[in-house]
Image (tube, helix red, strand yellow):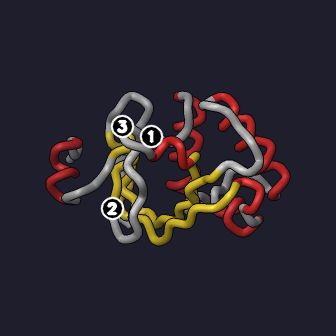
Amino acid sequence: MTKTLDDLKAKYPGAATFKFGDSERLSAELIALVRSGRKTGTCGALRDFTEGGEAMPVAGRKDIALNWDGTPALVIETTSVVIRRFCDVEAEFALSEGENEDLAGWQRDHSAYYERNGGFWPEMDVVCERFRLVEDLAGEAQ
């Protein structure tokens, strides 16, 4: 049975919705990484979590990740949130994002992402979120 966004919001009161990435291709890649169990972390520029922006992640809250077309893809539960400067992100967290094999690759790809989406500087604050997959809406629950 396909679950609608309204069904999910009723099941997970207080859930925020969001999309991974900044393109259809990147979004699909990141959702696939979560489904595979390789991606258990994500981060965003603190500036994007201001009034009118994305909802700040909160440990213990379940949120709904959307496919690029706005349909529900996954439900995740935030397990921790830390704000730190980009230049202070450690390899252990960077690798939890599942996108790169090392910290240098993560820094390269994420600095390019931030540059495309409002600007980048090494001392910028980023919101580092750890999460677990709760429900895969294309398959079975976790």
Residue tagged 2: 62
Give the distance between the C-alpha atoms of the residues marked 2 and 1, in whole angstroms.
Answer: 14 Å
3 and 1 marks in contact (CB < 8 Å): no
Is 94 left, or right, of 10 in this rendering? right
Q: Earlier in the sequence, mark 2 or mark 1?
A: 1
- Camera-side residue: 33 or 116? 116
Q: Position of residue 27 (x, y in %)?
A: 53, 37
Is 41 left, or right, of 111 in this rendering? left
Question: Farthest right residue?
Answer: 104
- Camera-side residue: 44 or 10? 44
Is 129 left, or right, of 138 in this rendering? right
- Of the residues tagged 3 and 1, which is closer to the observer? 3
Residue at x 22% of width, y 51% of height = 8
Residue at x 71% of width, y 38% of height = 120
Q: Which mark is residue 19?
A: 1
Neighbours of disc 1 within 10 Å: few (<14), some (14-19), many (20+): many
Give the distance between the C-alpha atoms of the residues marked 3 and 1, in whole angstroms.
Answer: 15 Å
* Amino acid tagged 2: Lys
Give the distance between the C-alpha atoms of the residues marked 2 and 3, in whole angstroms.
Answer: 20 Å
- Please say if 20 is above or below 119: below
Element assignment for label 2:
strand
Residue tagged 3: 52
Q: Position of residue 4 (x, y in %)?
A: 21, 42
Q: Position of residue 112 (x, y in %)?
A: 73, 35
